[in-house]
Amino acid sequence: MISDKQGQMLLKMARISIAEKLGLPVDKTQINIDQSFLEIKLGLFVTLHKNGALRGCIGVIEPVESLKTGVGETARLAAFKDSRFAPLTRDEFDQVDLEISLLSRPEKFEYSTAKELVQGLVPFKDGVIIKKGSRQATFLPQVWEQLPDAVSFLSQLCIKAGLDADEWTKGSLTVHIYRVHLFSEKK
């Protein structure tokens, strides 16, 4: 749906948005391809890494804004408003790599037992959303790189949602899965 060339343009747009917020000079001439695809609405996450470590990640699961609006806003939120990190500084700007994840529409995952849940997930492919009451959390498929087994993945996702680590074993969660189209500045 989105070509690699278009994905690279989204990364440039995200970087320009952060640079502008930092008051750094920007070169918008880099964005010179057909931009009609920017009207598409998709769920998206922008992730920043510094020296291979997470430096910020914020996104929206449901497609509420066009890529034209959403990429810049989400990039600024990831850089300056992720509560786990201090706002990005000018000194760090050139040290971070950006990643954009465009999400497919989440689909409900039906399961009856914890074993079915574990066996039904596709590591490194499935992004997972869990929900119980007002508590909800998601892990992008990239998180499988740090948590490659489904038990650890689901336990940490429950903790992220503010639930007990073993909540996923009780069959009381609503689970949705999605896939991402990933674009990265990393080579």
Image: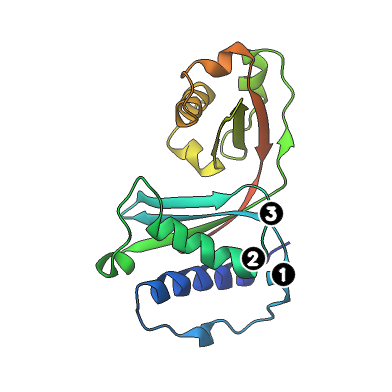
In what element is the residue under mark 1?
A: helix
Name the mark on residue 67.
2
> Is residue 123 shown left or right of residue 83?
right
Q: Amino acid at mark 2?
A: Leu
Q: Position of residue 38 (x, y in %)?
A: 68, 71
Q: Are marks 2 and 1 in contact (CB under 8 Å)?
A: yes
Reply above or below: 140 against 74: above
| Point 70% across, 48% down: residue | 104
Q: CA distance from mark 2 to mark 1?
A: 6 Å
Image coordinates of residue 90 in percent, x first then y, are: 28, 70
Q: Which residue is mark 3?
A: 63
Circle 2 Cα neighbour tier, 10 Å, few/some/many (<14 / 14–19 / ≥20): many
Residue at 32% in and 49% down: 85
User: Which disc is residue 39 wearing?
Assistant: 1
Residue 45 visible in the displayed image: yes
In the picture as drawn, the residue positioned furthest to the left comes out as 91
